[in-house]
Image (cartoon, rainbow, N blue to C red):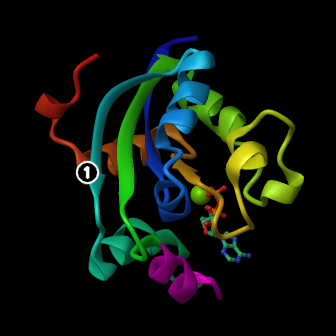
Amino acid sequence: MAIERTLSIIKPDATARNITGKINAVFEDNGLRVVAQKRLWLSKKQAEQFYAVHAERSFFGELTDYMVSGPVVVQVLEGESAITKNREVMGATNPANADEGTIRALFGQNVQENSVHGSDSPENAAIEISFFFAQTEIVG
Ligand code: ADP
Ligand code: MG
């Protein structure tokens, strides 16, 4: 077990409903600390770069349109096994399959508008954190 950092995004469906504080409360209740945070409106190019791994998926165009449909809150979360922990706290991609009490079960609307993104591996966490934050902006 080790203290890790992971990249989280509160997505446009959640900023539209003014529930960023409710989502942060779930992180904090589960031992994750918000050690960096900023609100951004992504460009289409940024969204395409961020989700480049999904470029071949059928939903790529829809996904990147959705991610630029409103503001997002990008964050670094820190805690014990933060990468895995955050994936647990988020719940399954499709809110219909997400465990009770997870962010996607509580707040997600459908498989696309599922309120949060979280890095899925230590390698991707490092890449995704540096996509949005300078080291000096992360204060643990
Ligand atoms: P996760 O966010 O759980 O890691 P993926 O990496 O598979 O899920 O997908 C990235 C994002 O793409 C999802 O969070 C969701 O917003 C969107 N997405 C995934 N699957 C679909 C789908 N079948 N239709 C539309 N959007 C999808
Ligand atoms: Mg993913």
Left or right? Give the position of 71 relative to 100. left
**Few, some or many residues within 10 Å of mark 1 (<14, 14–19, 20+):** some
Image quadrant holding the N terminus, namely top right
The percent coordinates of residue 134 (x first, y second) are 15, 40
Residue corresponding to mark 1 = 132
Asked if 6 appears above or below 35 in the picture, the reply is below
Q: Is residue 60 magenta?
A: yes
Asked whether mark 1 and ligand 2 are closer than 8 Å, the reply comes as: no
The residue shown at (78%, 60%) is 94
Q: Relative to 59, is 133 above or below? A: above
The main secondary structure of the magenta stretch is: helix
Secondary structure at badge 1 equals: helix
Q: What are the residue bounds of the magenta stretch?
A: 57-66
Residue found 34% across the figure and 49% down from its top? 127
Q: Position of residue 129 (x, y in %)?
A: 32, 43
Q: Where is residue 123 in the image (x, y as percent from the top left)?
A: 44, 43
Is residue 109 positioned above or below 31 on the image? below
Q: In which image quadrant can residue 76 be found?
A: top left
| Residue ranking furthest to the top | 1
When the figure is inspected, residue 72 is found, relative to residue 5, above or below; the finding is: below
Whether residue 137 sits left or right of residue 31 in the image: it is left
Residue at x 32%, y 81% (from the top left corner):
44
- The percent position of residue 135, horizontal first and vertical second, equals 16, 33
**Which of these two is toward me, 36 or 55?**
36
- Please name the residue shown 68% across and 33% down the image: 89
Q: In terms of depth relative to the viewer, which is nearer, 127 or 77? A: 77
Q: What residue type is labelled 1?
A: Phe
Q: Outermost residue toward the front? A: 18
Q: Is residue 137 magenta?
A: no
Question: Is 1 situated left or right of 110 in this image?
Answer: left
- Can you tell me which quadrant of the image ligand 1 is in? bottom right
Q: In which quarter of the image is residue 80?
A: top right
